[in-house]
Amino acid sequence: MMSKKGLPIVGVLLLVCLFFGFRSNGNDGSDPVRQEKILKSVAALLKDKHYSPKNINDAFSKIVFKQYLKDLDPEKNIFLQSDINTLRKFENSIDDEINKGQVQFFHEVNALYEKRMPEVVALYKEILAQPFDFSVNEKIQLDLDKIQFASNEAARKEVWRKRLKYLALERYADLLDQRDKDKSKDSVAPKTDAQLELDARQRVLKAMDRNFDRLKVRFTADERFNMYINAISESMDPYTSYFPPIEKRAFDEQMSGRFYGIGAQLRDEDGVIKVVSLVTGSPAWKSGEIQVNDIILKVAQGNAEPTDLAGFAVEDAVKLIRGSKGAEVRLTIKKSDGSVKVVALIRDEIIQDEIYARSAIVNQNGNKIGYIYLPEFYADFEKPNGNRSSSDVAAEIVKLKAEKVDGIVLDLRNNGGGFLYEVVKMVGLFIKDGPVVQVRDRDGKSSVLEDEDQTVLYDGPLAVMVNELSASASEIFAAAIQDYKRGIIIGSNSTYGKGTVQRSIPFGGRPMDFFTGGGDDLGALKLTLQKYYRVNGGSTQLKGVVPDVIIPDVYQFLKIREKDNDNALPWDEIKNSTYQTWNSNIDYNAVKRVAEARINSNTVFTTIHKNAEWLSKNADKEYDLNLAKYRERQKQIRSTVRENDTLTKLNNELDVASLQADQKKFFNNDDKAKGERYQQWLKSLKSDIYIDEASKVIGDMISSAKGLAFNK
């Protein structure tokens, strides 16, 4: 969803092309007939249903041509310029293929890709077999927009040499630092510079081997075809995307917080999938045959042939292990003693309650402030009583009111959105009634989604925390609270800026089984169908929501918002709705002035702003491959990043406590690992400088509501 240009910090990885997300496992697009069906279905939906479809013409063809090659080879270190020249014949004809359901361009690109990959593997192995000279003065360009395809094989080898040298340089510098800091460790201290240089190269080689093995296993022609379909769909706008069946199931699981699996948390350790914890009461736990530190070697669906997990990422292994309720999954397990056994388990419902709303109490300056964290606007529509963000937040408010809180902070930072109707219901918890959001379709028809319930669950002081990654539904909520003057929005200089509405439309022969990925279906298209607007008529598209109280943060200068997406839809506005602002006894303007004065005079926030700006200006530069120059640059960057990390944590921790109603969940959880994670979350709140400031704003609101004097 977001294109990010990384900060120039230690550990920058140059292997973007090796780490992009793998999509479904298996049989999505493995034959030409199926591919043509998928392409025709997607093309029809784009033309007939998209909110603002681009004409599928030569201009669109050029966009897709460029986008697919960028997705497939983002660092331009696989293909040669001659390959691109060969493919140019398709630059103005992809639109014709889309309209006719032909896939010749994909097949030619795929053939070239399969030809070049073994060459690249041989290249990195050859280069890493020889030592690097880090005393040479040379540079490497890290700005992907400034990189061109290599003119010939020798030029491509030089590109790889510099990239691998940079990766080795990172590790070599770290090993030198480690040796200098801790001379007592026999494993590091006795080694010479040459030995450390060899260690650095071997570590890069190991990382490269693992990732290319993963590419070989997971990034099949099927996956590359899925990527091609996405290059087409996302050329319409950033959120229109193709879901192969198993990916659609994963998306549904994320949005509902519920899935059918075995109840084991997994982790990738040195290329193997290892069990790190078990959910109490889950199938894995009940079996008694699976323990922490077991390695999962293979996964089979019932009696079917097992899939070897060698080269699989954790997220891909998880997709195989999850499936339909009551269905059997067989795991080939390697135990700690080296023995191997097959364990058959029956999938059952697993609730991911850690993605649900949760709350805590912040005691500050004599005020008892309720804090609610909402990671996304989820909803489980498969169950009549399934979890929904609006009802869960309502439940947290009831618990906080029972604790007699004086005000509430709702944290929507990093909340990427979710279900539109959940926002309407949630805004209704804080206002009497009225319009919440306006929605317009491709024909220009507008409708208003309203809160029709006149009851107000909470009418006290309210602050909403947002940041650059608060998107979509989060922005609707923040905008409504702001327009109604119901509370104060606190955060970075703007939210993400996503003002579009999507819906998944399945297509194919038989209805999808989203929980297995099986059947005769072809997948689904998550399609942009509408735009939404604030009740004041303005769109959040591109511009986002500008908080009432702006607080500097470390990400504010990064290009990660909607406005940084090339294919983003434009901003516009429509007629405002009729709504009645909240009748409050709080002097919001005075509270804002006090907060702004406090933030502007806070050296911590001014330093964070200065550092964030410096890091942004120093991003996307050429990097030195000379050790001395590299270390000098990294010293500056490390110092700045370390300072920001320190500044964002309070020296004097906040007084934060769990609610009485949540004592068991936090401190006596049947799932010990989950209970520990809840406790860790509670601990993290205590040092959060932004929660501290939001609590102070609530304190000012409380004083204003009581008519008490405070520094205006």
Image: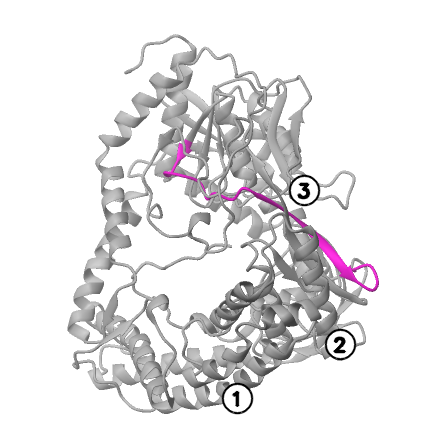
Q: Eyeballing the image, is 555 above or below 628?
A: above
Which amino acid lies under the numbered mark 2 shown in the image of this protein? Answer: Val
Q: CA distance from mark 2 to mark 1?
A: 24 Å
Indicate the quadrant where residue 386 lies: top right
Which amino acid lies under the numbered mark 3 shown in the image of this protein? Answer: Ala
Name the outermost residue toward the right.
510
Q: Position of residue 201 (x, y in %)?
A: 33, 83
Locate residue 682 relative to residue 184 in the image: left or right.
Answer: right
- Find the magenta span and give its range: 490-513
- Would you call the spot at circle 3 few (<14 residues within 10 Å), some (14-19), or many (20 or more)? many
Locate residue 328 relative to residue 168 in the image: left or right.
Answer: right
Q: Eyeballing the image, is 119 above or below 615?
A: below
Specify whether residue 573 is painted magenta. Answer: no
Name the residue tied to disc 2.
Answer: 33
Mark closest to the chain's N terminus, 1 or 3: 1
Indicate the quadrant where residue 428 lies: top right
- Would you call the spot at circle 1 few (<14 residues within 10 Å), some (14-19), or many (20 or more)? few
Q: Residue at x 71, y 60 (%)?
A: 44
Name the residue tied to disc 1.
Answer: 115
Of helix, strand and loop, which one carries label 1? Answer: helix
